[in-house]
Amino acid sequence: MPRKQRPNSSRTARNEYENGMDVEQQINREQTQQATASAHEADSKDFFHSHTLGFGATRTKKSLESPSKATPNEYHRNSDNGSTAQPTVKERKTIATAWDLPNLIRPLPVRRRPLQKNPRLLPHYPAVIEFIYNNRFAVAFQVQKKFPQYCHNLRTAQYQLANLIHAGYLNTAPVRSTSPNFPFVYFATKVGINLIRDTYAQLGLQWDAPATEGLKERGIGLESILHELLLTEWHQAVDTTIRNRPDLQCLLAERRYFRQEKRLKFRDNGKLRQVVPDAGFVIQVSQPENPPILLPHYVEFDNGTMSLPRIAEKFQHYNLWAEADEGHRYLVNLFQQFGIATNQPTFRLVVIAHANHHPGADQRRMIDLFAQSLALPSSMRDRIWLTTAEELRVHQNDELPLESAIWLRPRDARAWLGEYQQEVNSQDLAAAHKFALARRFVRERLDILPRHPLFPYQQN
């Protein structure tokens, strides 16, 4: 009789345990799915998708899954839409030690530099350098105005000046405290001065001039640059007037009275004093039936920075120099240099009033200078000619800029000079109040004074 098999209790227990685990996992899976669906429904209560408006397929559970989840077919991921995945932190190359630095060195690209051509020396370049040297400083538009036949426009002038700088004949002044649009200010170098000397020597003429004055290493003050450029503009007005007047001729022009050998020196009470004009020039006026007239001019371009007592002192120094033996001898020799023998030489003092720090106040500054001139002796008062920088600017493009009647002469105040002195000196006032009274007196009578051209056809 076959032997009856006994049930294996351990195998039965194991099967029952596995079946129980499957049931429990199925229950947990179903609970998880129900919780996920409830969460999605709660999140999408107030969410209006285009699918819910009928523009697309109905929103399902599958569309709410993460885009990184695999598709049912498992052949690609939703994130792989043709874009390159960013490398992770582990994939980035990091620099751990200095041994890795050579791998990061890349040679810079070598760019070809254009060959620098040596500019050709044009025939009119020595004249341009001489013009800048004689005026000490100039800008491009002043050079273009002086040489319109060679510099047809401002760009051509700038190009030629750049060539002169490249050749070493000119240089630019290191101007401080200006805007980026401030033009280059040119001056002649020692090489340029030698070029002028050699050019004159080739023509059989002798021209000698000392080396240009040294420049400060830190640049030139803006006030000094403006003062020099305005004087250059003034000399261009003189040159234009003389060029268009056949009876006028400029025999001498000087811009360097600050040098020791050019100063106007004299002795006053045993003390050596000196006068330093801003500029000077000598004009010869031809007359048909009479000998030519020689008119030395000394220029004071007032920027409004000098105090009025200092201006009055400078006027007095001009008067003392003219009356001193040194001044008389200087003027006699100057007249003899140009072939005119006289024992009563004279000169003009040209004063240009300009309130640099107060735009539109040039007229007020001229009233102050006019009042200061009334305290001078009649011989010196008759030598003074006054105008404003604004008046010169209005007529700068005229054919005869200095032929305009813009000049005032203190000699025309003789009619009311006694009344002026009586009113100003009769009251015991402080210096400031006294000068305010003098200014008001002059201002009320300045408009009725006659105005003159600087170069009349007949000497006044």
Image (cartoon, rainbow, N blue to C red):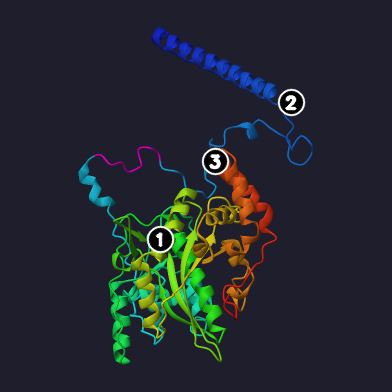
Task: Locate residue 389, reporting x and y percent.
Answer: 57, 62
Which range of residues does the magenta coloring cover?
A: 88-96
Mark number, residue 46: 2
> What percent of the width, then of the height, locates residue 360?
62, 54
**Looking at the picture, does residue 4 appear above or below residue 383?**
above
Q: Residues within 10 Å of mark 2 (few under 14, many from 20)?
A: few
Q: Which residue is mark 3?
A: 432
- In the image, is 33 to the left or to the right of 324? right
Which residue is the extreme one toward the right? 54
Residue 20 in the image: above or below residue 40? above
Residue closer to the observer: 383 or 428: 428
Residue drawn at 54 percent across, 73 percent down:
237
Indicate the quadrant containing the C terminus: top left, top right, bottom left or bottom right.
bottom right
Near mark 3 (Cα within 10 A), the count class, few <14, some 14-19 or many ≥20, is: few
Q: Secondary structure at mark 2?
A: loop
Within the magenta stretch, is there residue 136?
Answer: no
Q: Earlier in the sequence, mark 2 or mark 1?
A: 2
> In the rendered structure, which amino acid carries the disc numbered 3?
Ala
Q: From the viewer's side, name the closer residue of 268 and 120.
A: 268
Of the residues shown, which amino acid type is indicated by label 1? Leu
